[in-house]
């Protein structure tokens, strides 16, 4: 089968590798939609990478003995190869599994093999492209907003309006929250407004904190979700969110982040937490967002066949885009 590899600095191409093999309880998925996530960072790292990507949706084409899916099922492919037995896996919080198998398997490919319990069924009235948004399109922010208790009484501030942050806008609007965003990218700011954000502010403004407070009113937003992974955005959220509010960090960074125990957490009584993906039992609720949110497909701004991977990465890296989705096969995914 064909899959994507990073060949060097800003060079992506296809390579041919053996078909993945199945184990008991596993199934083989023909990938019809593979959204790009942060792989553009590998693209510009200059190092070669094989077996990349972790988001996919498609159709089951083969099942091993004991698999819980059937050939022909339309499914979302959940990330990683968790053990299926530990306390995290049995609660559907498999993303935190410590016994994750490190396999040669990537989603930017024609096929992927998975334990069948990680293949979640796409309802008939949701297309495979839109279903694929149940990976990192809507997933991380769904988990974050669920844990923060975002509802119709919430004023929500989202920092970073890349594909994950745009998903946070969708989830917030779906829950009835008043949603505000912070991002300097005009394309993404406009897309956030189109998806229902009340206002998007530019973090380059010196008085952005005052602007956030003026826009959100009251003592500041109730909940902040960071999807940027930028420490200055963490600082802005922690300063902006009201006392007794909640800040959830979703965007990843390896840089130190400026959280102060006394002024930020103790004296504001604030909850600051991290969240990664969502619990598998919540999958039907994520599908409900995708099924009922009018125009949710606007999150997908670009679609490319697999052999245009170089262009797809260039678009993803340039960031004048929402979600970029690869179609490994010519047939239009339904
Ligand atoms: Zn586990
Ligand atoms: Zn992702």
Image (cartoon, rainbow, N blue to C red):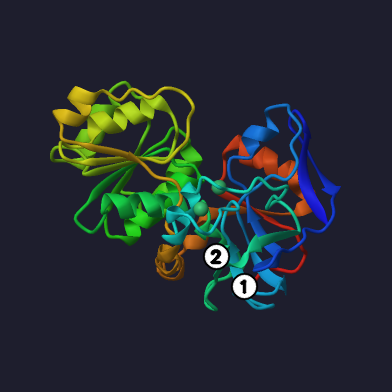
Query: Residue at left 63%, top 76%?
Result: 73
Neighbour tally class for label 1: few under 14, some 14-19, many 20 plus, Cα within 10 Å: many
Q: Is residue 59 left or right of residue 223?
A: right
Residue 295 percent coordinates (x, y): 46, 63
Sequence-first disc among 2 and 1 = 1
Q: Work out whether 200 lies above or below 73.
A: above
Give the residue displayed 24% in from the left and 33% down from the top. 240
The numbered dot on residue 103 is: none
- Relative to 292, 218 lies left or right: left
Total count of labels: 2
Is residue 57 visible from the viewing direction of this image?
yes
Mark-to-mark CA distance, 2 and 1:
9 Å
SS at circle 1: strand
Which quadrant of the rendered structure holds the N terminus?
Answer: bottom right
Are discs 2 and 1 less than 8 Å apart at CB?
yes
Quarter in which the C terminus is drawn:
bottom right
Which is nearer the eye, 278 or 213? 278
In front: label 2 or label 1 = 1
Please tell me which residue is depicted at 68% across the width and 29% down the height of the picture: 44
Q: Quadrant of residue 12?
A: top right
> With 184 as the anchor, is 38 left or right in this view?
right
Q: Position of residue 52 (x, y in %)?
A: 69, 44
Mark identifier at residue 74? 1
Mark 2 Cα-neighbour bin, 10 Å: few <14, some 14–19, many ≥20:
many
Image height of 85 relative to 247, above or below:
below
Q: Which residue is mark 2?
A: 131
The answer to which image quadrant residue 256 occupies is top left
Q: Is residue 137 visible?
A: no
Q: Secondary structure at mark 2?
A: helix
């Amino acid at each position: 089968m064909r899959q994507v590899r990073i060949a060097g600095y800003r060079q992506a191409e296809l390579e041919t590798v053996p078909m993945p093999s199945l184990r008991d309880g596993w199934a083989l998925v023909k990938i019809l939609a593979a959204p790009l996530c942060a792989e553009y960072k590998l693209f510009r790292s200059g190092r070669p990478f094989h077996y990349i990507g972790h988001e996919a949706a498609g159709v089951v084409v083969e099942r091993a003995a004991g698999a819980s899916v059937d050939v022909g099922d339309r499914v979302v492919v959940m990330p990683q190869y968790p053990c299926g037995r530990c306390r995290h896996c049995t609660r559907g919080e498999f993303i935190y599994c410590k016994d994750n198998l490190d396999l040669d398997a990537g989603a930017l490919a024609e096929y992927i093999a998975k334990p069948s319990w990680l293949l979640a069924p796409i309802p008939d009235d949701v297309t495979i492209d839109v279903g694929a948004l149940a990976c990192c399109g809507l997933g991380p922010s769904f988990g974050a907003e669920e844990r923060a208790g975002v509802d119709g009484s919430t004023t929500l501030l989202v920092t970073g309006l890349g594909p994950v942050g745009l998903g946070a806008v969708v989830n917030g609007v779906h829950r009835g929250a008043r949603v505000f965003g912070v991002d300097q990218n005009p394309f993404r700011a406009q897309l956030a407004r189109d998806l229902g954000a009340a206002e998007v502010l530019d973090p380059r403004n010196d008085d952005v904190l005052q602007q956030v407070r003026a826009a959100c009113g009251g003592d500041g937003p109730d909940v902040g979700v960071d999807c940027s992974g930028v420490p200055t955005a963490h600082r802005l959220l922690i300063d902006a969110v009201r006392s007794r509010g909640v800040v959830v960090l979703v965007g990843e960074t390896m840089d130190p982040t400026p959280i102060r125990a006394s002024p930020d957490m103790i004296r504001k009584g604030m909850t600051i937490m991290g969240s990664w993906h969502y619990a598998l039992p919540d999958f039907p609720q994520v599908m409900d967002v995708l099924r009922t949110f009018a125009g949710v497909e606007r999150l997908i701004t670009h679609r490319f066949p697999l052999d245009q991977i170089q262009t797809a990465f260039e678009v993803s890296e340039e960031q004048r885009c929402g979600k970029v989705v690869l179609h490994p096969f010519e047939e239009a995914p339904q």
